Image (spheres, rainbow, N blue to C red):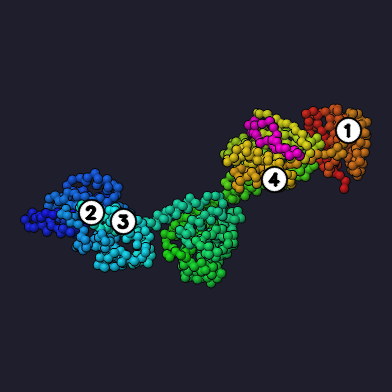
Amino acid sequence: MALQDNGAGSRPDGTPEPYTTASATAIAIAIADERGVITGWSEEARNLLGYLPGEVVSRPAADLLVSHLPPSALRRLAEQAPWCGVLPARHRNGRTVDVAVRACPCPDRDGRTQWVLTASGTDGSSLPGDGGALLRELTLSQLPVAVAFYDRDNRAVGANDVIARIVGLPEGQIRGRRLRDFLPSPAYDEFTELQDQVVRTGEPVHVVRHLRAPSESRGRVWSVFLSPLKNHLGQVQGSSIALLDITEQYLARQRLQLVDEAGNRIGSTLDVTRTAQELVDVVVPRLADYASVDLLEFIHRGEEPPDGPPSGPVTMRRTARQADTDALLGIMLRLGSKVEYPVSAPTAECLATGRSAVYEVDDSSMARWTAQDPERATRLLRTGAHSVMVVPMRARGVTLGSVFLGRTRHPETFAQDDVLLAEEITARAAVCIDNARRYTRERVTAMTLQRSLLPVALPRQPAVEAASRYLPAGGRAGVGGDWFDVIPLSGARVALVVGDVVGHGIQASATMGRLRTAVRTLADIDLPPDELLTHLDDVVIRLSSEAAADADTAGDIGATCLYAVYDPVSRRCSLARAGHPPPVVVTPDGEATFLDLPASPPLGLGGLPFEACEVELPEGSLLALYTDGLIEDRGHEIDERLRTLRRTLTRPAQALDTLCDDVLATLLPAFPDDDIALLVARTHALGAGQVATWSLPPEPVVVAQARKHVTDQLTAWGLDESAFVTELVVSELVTNAIRYGRPPIQLRLIHDGSLICEVSDASSTSPHLRRARSFDEGGRGLLLVAQFAWHWGTRHAAQGKTIWAEIPLAV
């Protein structure tokens, strides 16, 4: 702090004290740090209070005061706001001196607050009107900031050496001139206006501006403080300007902000291409005028990475690009283009060494590349780049590709700080791209597994015309355990199945495959829907037990399922569901309803019954089975979604494939949250002319009658060439029913693409193949049936059984 004594003093030996009297116009200046410790002491301060610099520097400024600072001063200083007032100070000779003090905050080169303290005697001295005596004999060389003082007319009355170096003029040529006289650039006109504002209002102003000083070739960022200069009465007599170069701090903050922005913007999805584009969108134009990302081919193919960094010529794919002008963007390679870099190319060298590199257009490395790859070099020169940077993209020890950055309009070349910044951003993006790569690989694997477990094509059968769709979940959910199936059954019937395993990923897909296999196995033995779900429930419980014993799996397994069996002869459909949404039935007249099926629990709970119901469907009815992903949406009520589904299914008749696409387009967003399986079937009916039925008495002589019935019926159908095989099969099946079964016995023939023979009786005992010995009179009947029929089997009903055989028709 700088204080002044108006009185005379003497040394202890009686000789005059040379520093006790100061000119009335002299201004004492001291510098204090943010703790109030004195760090600078001017000659005028020595004249004012008599202390040598060594006696006060490193001491608290408060030690020089006789009393404590008033509360108003403490409050203003705590707010880091300027303050002025009269304070009693302690002179070196012990006397008390009243001084007019003004304290102004000013940051140092490191951004820390320091205080510029000006003081004078209280004899009414002020800034003279002509400014000539304001800072007479004043030395400001100790100040670490650029400082200049101006009178009320904005004419300079003094400046330190720092500001003289900035403007490129000696201090003598600055005095008496306004700011616009030696800084005529329009960029500095604002400061003249701010000077007028400070003088007019008496309030300080702080601004941060990016300016280029006349003595320098590049711009800097300045923290500018404009403060009023007041006398001891508080009257504004002029202004001061203090400039602090904060370029490094500003750039550091900009880099930190860019890194923070990169962390927020890069990696918003698990998509390789989008993540790469987010990277170039962040760095252009803040760090570079244009940028591109090239990734190695194995990433796009979903393959495992090669061992070690690539060596030799490198082939990559342009995955992302960005430029600050459309013209520059048009010169760059198109997205998806293959890029081949020779060994001499900077990109190839960068990938081989694993280190970033900065090149000027006239570097020797660029010259070698130009000679070997003139087309690419010419394209680079067309961009107008004067400085380029190549950064390898690596994550978890795997080289993924490279980032290429170029500067055209940025005047500065890439510096080391820019390299570190680019490497930090690239490293963040590389981890995100590697995560996306791993996710894509796992998703492709899971989808491949999922699709291999789903029907490639729906089987042809006479009962229904069917179409299906499977759509995996979008976003991060991944594939799940939804499935559907169409299973031909005996007697021209068909089973329609839709199921959903809880969860997503490979584990859910694998569980789905096991359940689909189990359903097909249970369907082969012709179990009714409710019994089939009971057995499937046992399978899910067993799978849950296995999963609970495996530390690598998630534990309990849950699933839902809807199983329906449709008979085209009777046109009746038997259905049962386990925690699954009910199906939609659309009759030929266009009326759509949700079947009111008993609400049975999901699979895997155990101990709870499943109930089935049976409905008659007119020929041409539409039956729609689906999983919950089709109707559940966070933004809509479930009832609204169900109404939309029903309304969509009742639109005018169209191809089933078109109808499936229409349903998905109407109900689903671009990226559904869950898997969707949809199975739509239009029912057919077999007419009376395609089915023949006979009731047979349990007498051996009826076998001959049965053969005659069959022969006559085949003749009526035009199938005489198949009569021999059919008679043989019918004879064996009827004979077995008479010998081992119980009445009533019934024979039925069904003709639709193939010939199906069925013999029913009231016994529940199932026949089975056995090897007959040489002298056995029986035991060969079913063996003959198995030899001549395509398929044969047994199905059970509530009472009795049916043995059936499908016989190929003679061509």
Image point (88%, 31%), residue name: 695
**Which amino acid type corresponds to the residue marked 3 in the rendered image?**
Gln
**Numbered disc in front, either 4 or 1:** 4
Image point (43%, 65%), residue name: 411
Tell me which corner region of the image, top left, top right, bottom left or bottom right, holds residue 10. Answer: bottom left
**Numbered disc in front, either 2 or 1:** 2
Above or below residue 451? Residue 701 is above
Please state which of residues 721 and 616 is positioned toward the viewer in this rendering: 616
Callout 3 secondary element: helix
**Which amino acid type corresponds to the residue marked 4 in the rendered image?**
Cys
Tell me which corner region of the image, top left, top right, bottom left or bottom right, holds residue 24. Answer: bottom left
The magenta stretch is: 579-606
Contact? badges 1 and 3 (CB < 8 Å)? no
**Image x and y of residue 371, in percent:** 53, 72
Please state which of residues 693 and 186 is positioned toward the viewer in this rendering: 186
Res. 197 mark: 3
Task: Judge whether residue 444 is colored magenta.
Answer: no
Task: Of the two numbered discs 2 and 3 on the same chain, state the one appearing first in sequence.
Answer: 3
**Numbered disc in front, either 4 or 2:** 2
Callout 4 secondary element: helix
Mark 3 closeness class: few <14, some 14–19, many ≥20 residues within 10 Å = some
**Image x and y of residue 31, in percent:** 24, 55
Task: Of the two numbered discs 4 and 2 on the same chain, state the one appearing first in sequence.
Answer: 2
Residue furthest to the bottom in view is 371
Contact? badges 4 and 1 (CB < 8 Å)? no
Q: Which residue is mark 2?
A: 235
**Which amino acid type corresponds to the residue marked 1 in the rendered image?**
Trp
**Which amino acid type corresponds to the residue marked 2 in the rendered image?**
Gln
Res. 660 mark: 4
Can residue 121 be seen at all in this image of the molecule?
no
Residue at mark 4 to residue at mark 3: CA–CA distance:
73 Å
